[in-house]
Image (spheres, rainbow, N blue to C red):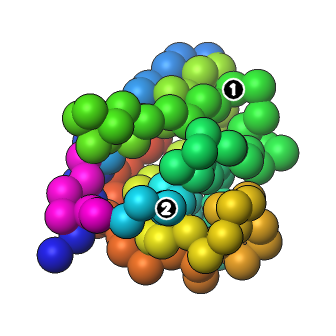
Amino acid sequence: QVQLVESGGGSVQAGGSLRLSCAASGYTYTRYCMGWFRQAPGKEREGISTIENNGRTRYADSVKGRFTISQDNAKNTLYLQMNSLKPEDTAMYYCAAGPSAFPGYCSGGYAFSGDGFRYWGQGTQVTVSS
C-alpha cells in the first residue's frame, strides 16, 4: 500500500519561504514520477512541479525561479522548496506519485495535469498573507 504524507505547510507573509516534505512508503516502482500540485478554493487543481526517477523536472510558469523540487531517495522523501511566496500561492498543496510509462512521461501534459498520477497525499495548507 503506497502512502504519501505531506508536511511543512503553514502561514507566512509574502516574500517568505516554506519547505514542503512528502514522505513516501510502500513504493516499489523503478521508473516513477512524483509531483506537487495545488488547489485553491474555487479553482481547478494546478500542477506545480514534477520529477522523474532520472531527475528530470518540470515547473509551472507561475513558480519557475521560486520553487525547487527535489528528492532524497535514501529517505524516500520528496521536497518542495518555496521561496518568494506570493498571496496567490495560497492553496492546499498535494504530493502525488505514480509509475512512469516512459522516459519523459512525468513532464508531459497528461502527468502534469495530475491525471497521470495514481497515488495522492492528504494535502498540506499553505497560506501567504500580503
The answer to whether mark 2 and mark 1 are in CB contact below 8 A is: no
Residue placed most toward the observer, 17 or 59:
59
Closer to the eye: label 2 or 1:
2
Amino acid carrying mark 1 in the image: Arg
State the quadrant of the C terminus: top right
Q: Quick one: SS at disc 2?
A: strand
Q: Which mark is residue 32?
A: 2
Q: Which mark is residue 66?
A: 1
State the quadrant of the N terminus: bottom left
Amino acid carrying mark 2 in the image: Tyr
Task: Please determine whether, in this image, residue 22 is positioned above or below residue 68.
Answer: below
Residue 87 lies left or right of residue 36; in this view the side is: right
- Residue count near mark 2 (Cα–Cα under 10 Å), binned few <14, some 14–19, many ≥20: many
Task: Please determine whether, in this image, residue 19 is positioned above or below residue 110.
Answer: above
- How many marks can you see? 2
Residue at 73% x, 60% y: name it: 104
The image quarter in which residue 30 lies: bottom left
Would residue 25 be counted in the magenta stretch? yes
Residue 7, how many percent across, how many down? Answer: 26, 42
